[in-house]
Amino acid sequence: LRIEFTWNGRTENVEGEYNTDYFKKVMDVAKDNEMSVTALLAYNNSLYSSNTKGAIDTQEERTAFVNYAKAIVSAYPEIKKVEIWNEPNHPDFWENGASVIGETDIANYTLLVKEVSAALKAISPDINVYAGAIDVSKEAIEYVEGMLENGVYEYMDTLSYHPYYHPNNVD
């Protein structure tokens, strides 16, 4: 079961104060039905950026995101899989003010994965960190190559991708 653990407006509404109660019911249902949960940790927070789907591109935003991720995994130790962001190679989800994702965006996403992974593995060493959730229709190979060039490999356990099929774009 993939659950989006929303940071903005749900988990952190006051800097440094985390409320994870919103997710309790769905986590209880998953547990009662013996379902494993993949926690999608995604998007920015209006406490740190005016654009809640904006790219995480400052150390302050990365540190805040790491703290949010730690709050989720600490509240729900049964979470053994986390996906860091959704489609960071798509401008609709890693908004940077441009219509394409550039090298700086790849480097910033990779830094985010590295910092979140290190923090979560310190709490839960057996947690499976998914990087990507790559939209394969948006220059996916170049993006993954960029992630690898920036050293993401040793910080991720799984590369996630969304294999969309666009029948009107057969090139």
Image (tube, rainbow, N blue to C red):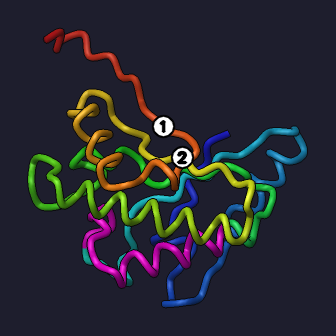
Q: Quick check: 144 left or right of 11? A: left
Instruction: Locate residue 97: give its quadrant.
Output: bottom left
* Residue lying at 27% horizontally and 60% vertically, measured from the top left: 107
Nearer the N terminus, badge 1 or badge 2?
Answer: 2
Residue 130 got which mark?
Answer: 2
Residue 160 got which mark?
Answer: 1
* Residue lying at 29% horizontally and 40% vertically, measured from the top left: 145
Residue 106 drawn at (x, y percent): 26, 54
Which of 154 and 115 lies nearest the eye of the viewer?
Answer: 154
Residue 154 drawn at (x, y percent): 51, 52
Instruction: Give the answer, above or below, for where 128 lies relative to 144.
Output: below
* Residue lying at 34% horizontally and 81% vertically, measured from the top left: 59
Residue 76 lies in the magenta stretch: no
Amino acid found under the numbered disc labelled 1: Ser
Instruction: Give the answer, above or below, for where 67 lies relative to 169.
Output: below
Amino acid found under the numbered disc labelled 2: Tyr
Q: Quick check: 50 left or right of 102? A: right
- Image quadrant containing the C terminus: top left
| Disc 1 residue crowd, few under 14, some 14–19, many 20+, Cα 10 Å | some
Which of 44 and 146 lies nearest the eye of the viewer?
Answer: 146
